[in-house]
Image: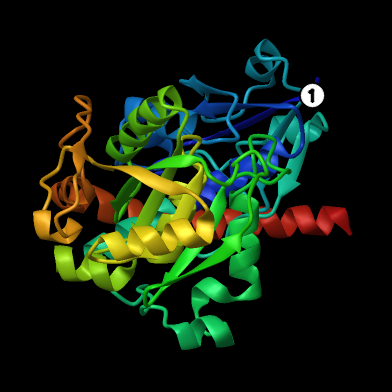
Amino acid sequence: MAKIWIDGCFDFAHHGHAGAMMQARQQGDELYVGVHNDDDILINKGPPVMTLEERMIAVNGCRWCTEAVPDAPYVTDPKVMDEYGCKYVVHGDDITTDKDGKDCYAEVKEMGRFIVVKRTPNISTTDLVGRMLLFSKDHHIKPITEEDWVNKNSLLLTVDSIESYRKYATASDAKSPGVQVFLNCEGHIHKLISGSQNIEAGKKAYFVNGGFDLFNPGHILLLKKIKELATADNAIVVVGVSDDYTVSHMKGSNYPIMNLFERSLCVLQSKYIDVLILASPEKINAEFLETFANVSKHEIVKILHGPTKMIAEDYDGLDVETVNVEKFKNMDVSSIVDRVIANREAFEERQRRKGWKREVEAQLEAKEKEKAV
């Protein structure tokens, strides 16, 4: 049985991290994910936004992770890999350096125990922190219309995006079909990804809806609890993710920090969901649930909501059950942004430091390419 190692900070549960784990899982039968501790990240990179405990919850919640390993050394140590029976470590096609500008994977590369996968473009923890500090809204995606669906005229409907949804919907082996994905366009629901045949038509479903911005331990533990409740009732879990216009309308400012494409991929990689609905409507009503049941062949028998305040009119008189999750129940996107704002000076220094490290890493990358020629 081939066991694979991957390590990192995994600060914020963004789809770039999930994409790396997915590609790593494709290389073997089990995936062990090393998570650096807060002190090592502070020394080598700058202050993490999320704590080790919070980051461990995020990694363990990924469908392709076999086991998350805390306190993994910042510079990859083959002896630690050996402890978990992992012959190879996987990393993206970029260079990662320590505090001294040295390649964190130099030793395992020399040993021939390094596998390169494609890094997910246009997303990183640094990018997300930058959006918070600059109050940017340039990343938002406009609502999708029926005309957009027909003409495939949206970032969510490009060939590359649909391929991303197919990959992130894969089962725990990161290869076979898993989660079903639907898209809501002006009240019409379309199937985007067929998913596993194990999600039988006619299965009753538990439904939860939300923005899921800066996908965090509060979201993850909520979905985990809902999955437990649904499994006990022989039901599946259906998750609706609101579009950017809806989240912005409800939250104001520059929210959401992540756009719909980014947020939906974060939810899609969760081991606690079976079906995803993109661009779920601002108001959940009986008509929407009936339309979904007709298209998906899954009847929603229970609507659930997290411990945050629920606005009754958003559910149009439908019965909604609150799911209480004590740990991280008060964590939401604004509380995470507050952490960044409160430590603005440190995070701005991190952004500047990242620029310096990027230059060093680019030089190391150029040298590696020269060697390969």
Q: In this view, does 4 lie above or below 120?
A: above
Query: Where residue 3 sits in the image (x, y, percent)?
Result: 73, 23
- Say whether residue 165 is visible: yes
Q: Is residue 61 above or below residue 164?
A: above
Q: Is residue 67 above or below residue 305?
A: above
From the viewer's side, name the closer residue of 132 and 25.
Answer: 25
Residue 143, quarter of picture: bottom left
Image quarter (top left, top right, bottom left or bottom right) of the C terminus: bottom right
From the viewer's side, name the closer residue of 309 and 119.
Answer: 309
Residue 141, quarter of picture: bottom left
Image quarter (top left, top right, bottom left or bottom right) of the N terminus: top right
The type of residue carrying mark 1 is Ala
Residue drawn 31% across and 31% down?
A: 51
Q: Is residue 108 left or right of residue 301?
A: right
Residue drawn 76% across and 40% down?
A: 115
* Residue farthest along the top direction in this orientation: 83
Q: Is residue 243 left or right of residue 345?
A: right
- Say whether residue 253 is visible: no
Label tally: 1
Query: Where residue 167 sits in the image (x, y, percent)?
Result: 65, 53
From the viewer's side, name the closer residue of 33 and 42.
Answer: 33
Q: Report the residue marked by disc 1.
A: 2
